[in-house]
Image: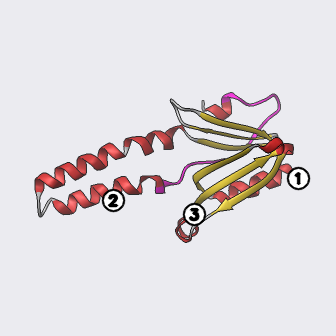
Amino acid sequence: MGYIESNLLPDEKIVYKARLHWIIFWKSWALIFLGIVFLFIQPIIAAIVIAIGVFALISPIIDYATSEFGVTNKRVIIKVGVLRRRTLELLLKHVEAISVDQSVTGRILGFGSITLTGTGGVREVFHNISSPLEFRRQIQGEAS
């Protein structure tokens, strides 16, 4: 049971869940691919580059496994991180604005950043969310 499920209020139901996008792994994959290319040129350098790529995978794997983005019929609930946990639980009636920022690459591959602004000056930005437009649409749909 994840963070969102374990923190639901009475009569609260999950409407939509999002994840981090696989793009968070691209640097690690690029290093591993570069190491494979170097296998044919310099095997020692290849081993070092592949090891760095595999080591660089640890952080994105942890981020991917522990980040939760959810919309319920009452709130927006977001949890990011393990050791340094950051959470946002914002009642839908307190959401003032939701903005989506996508680069050209983000539009093509389906990821982007979401900025949630709530009453009282709460402003949180979350990066590399998969299908950010759908996440925004779900929040707007439940808030109305």
Q: Nearer the viewer, residue 3 or 87?
A: 87
Taking the spot 15% from the left edge, 59% from the top edge, the residue there is 39
The colour scheme used here is secondary structure
Q: Earlier in the sequence, mark 3 or mark 2?
A: 2
State the image coordinates of residue 125 (x, y, percent, origin top left).
65, 49
Q: Which residues are magenta?
A: 6-23
| Quadrant of res 46 | bottom left
Residue corresponding to mark 3: 110
Task: Tell me the amino acid under the disc marked 3.
Answer: Gly
Q: Nearer the viewer, mark 3 or mark 2?
A: 2
Q: Residues within 10 Å of mark 3 (few under 14, many from 20)?
A: some
| Disc nearer the start of the sequence (1/3) | 3
Q: Secondary structure at mark 3?
A: loop
Does residue 40 appear anywhere in the picture? yes
Instruction: Identify the residue at image location x=35%, y=52%.
Output: 28
Gap between marks 1 and 2, in whole Å? Answer: 43 Å
Badge 2 element: helix
Q: Is residue 59 magenta?
A: no
The quadrant in which residue 60 appears is: top left
Residue indicated by mark 2: 30
Looking at the image, residue 25 lies above or below residue 76: below
Horizontal side of 134 relative to 66 (left or right) equals right
Q: Amino acid at mark 1?
A: Ser
| 16 left or right of 121 in image | left
Quarter residue 81 falls in: top right
Assess disc 1: are there few (<14), some (14-19) or many (≥20) residues with their C-alpha within 10 Å of its C-alpha: few
Q: Is residue 34 above or below residue 126?
A: below
